[in-house]
Amino acid sequence: MTDTRPPIHGHARIAIRADASINCGSGHVMRCLTLADGLRSEGADVHFITRAHQGNLDALIESRGYRVHSLGTSRPESGDKLAIVGGPPHAAWLGCDFTTDLNDTSRVLESIGNVDWLVVDHYALDARWETPLREFADRLFVIDDLADRDHDADLLLDQNMVANARQRYVSRSGPRCQHLLGATYALLRPEFAKLRETAKHHRLEGPARLLVFFGGVDATDETGKFLDAWSADSAKRFVADLVVGANHPRRALHGQCALPGVNVHGYVPAMAALMANADHAFGASGTSNWERFCLGLNASVVSVADNQWAIARYLGDGGWVDSLGDAGNTTAETYREALRMLVPASEAARARRERLMQAVDGRGVDRVVRRLLDKPEEK
């Protein structure tokens, strides 16, 4: 369906509705921050609309120079009720019923003024929330990974490699919706593209370097399981850079870790540099998949949330990653065996590094920004 609205001229005004919390993690806000940086570099005025869940990243967003419009504290009991009466599978993540969030967001958008794009990155929101907000936005852009609910959008991004990628949104979005599908649109920070050459010429010398990071929350404490698996033999073969997320339930404990061969980091803004210098990673099957692909970093991945399982299975079956299964079933022995079997310098590992880098070039943000701002894509 052809978009008959006039192209965006001058400085675009864009509002982003996304949350971070103990339940939904930090990935939604972090990738939206990456998108916001790309939009701002083209002159856009970007606002964030968030709810003040436990584990929110409002301070981080503000530290990056963006205005945050907080919708107040969450009410978990309302979210639980909505999940029971037939909302989206992740309705409880909203912290209130969708009509409350709709009304709160409407008031914020009215105060901002009409926006060129309303960007929505939230598993708890669907077409029932999106359609009424067209009153305040010229266009709606939905970022999704699950295809488990209906959307009323003009543009939809799913940056994942997953089975039936093109078919699964056919009945979930209206005829006006255009789709950006696949990891070529992955929202990666610009430093990943810049470090591709560094990663491409990385050579394994001495003990193999491991990057261990299971996301900002790591609710199942995969970090702890990995540390429990670490042995004297591991320290002879590997050096591990272990990153502990800001919302990790046992952050203080791991911050005091003094195992031989293990370097513990807190929040690391230069994650790309750690990845570029690593020989293998242990991590979650979320957004980090595409960061690792971009830098040719082989990985052993765990599904730390139900919504990661389909992607992890697809990537594991396709030989893109080593899948360790679901976090609910992993133990220290899972990681002990993975470390025992790991040979980062093998010919198979080198071949897979090249395959990963061919799949993701790190220019996804540029492609998405150009679509949002009606600019032709660079060749």
Image (cartoon, grey):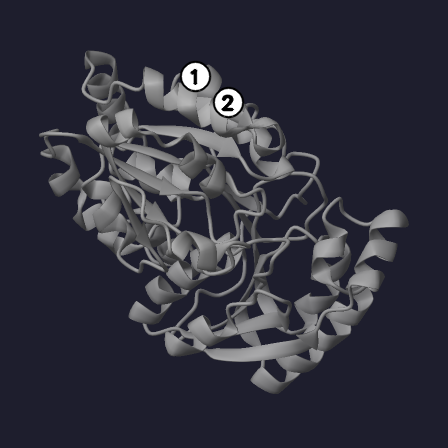
> What residue sits 12% from the left and 34% below the top?
202
| Mark 2 nearby-residue class (10 Å; few <14, some 14–19, many ≥20) | some
Residue 316 in view here? yes
Q: Position of residue 240 (x, y in %)?
A: 28, 39
Is 58 on the left or on the right of 241, as rendered?
A: right
Question: Disc 1 marks which amino acid?
Answer: Gly
> What residue sits 67% from the left and 66% below the top?
134
The N terminus - image quarter: top right
Which of 200 and 10 lies nearest the eye of the viewer? 200
Q: Choose top left, top right, bottom left or bottom right for residue 275.
A: top left
Give the number of marks.
Answer: 2
Say the numbered circle drawn on residue 132: none
**Height in image: 172 above or below 106?**
above
Q: Which residue is mark 1?
A: 318
Is 277 on the left or on the right of 368, as rendered?
A: left
Q: Position of residue 256 (x, y in %)?
A: 38, 56
> What residue sits 24% from the left and 47% below the top?
274
Say the numbered circle drawn on residue 314: 2
Is 183 on the left or on the right of 378, as rendered?
A: right
Task: Check if mark 1's residue and mark 2's residue have beta carbons within 8 Å.
Answer: yes
Residue 360 in view here? no
Q: Choose top left, top right, bottom left or bottom right for residue 186.
A: top left
Which of 39 and 235 lies nearest the eye of the viewer? 235
Q: Choose top left, top right, bottom left or bottom right for residue 237.
A: top left
Question: Disc 2 marks which amino acid?
Answer: Tyr
The C terminus - image quarter: top left
Q: Position of residue 137 (x, y in %)?
A: 60, 70
**Marks 1 and 2, how far apart at CA:** 6 Å
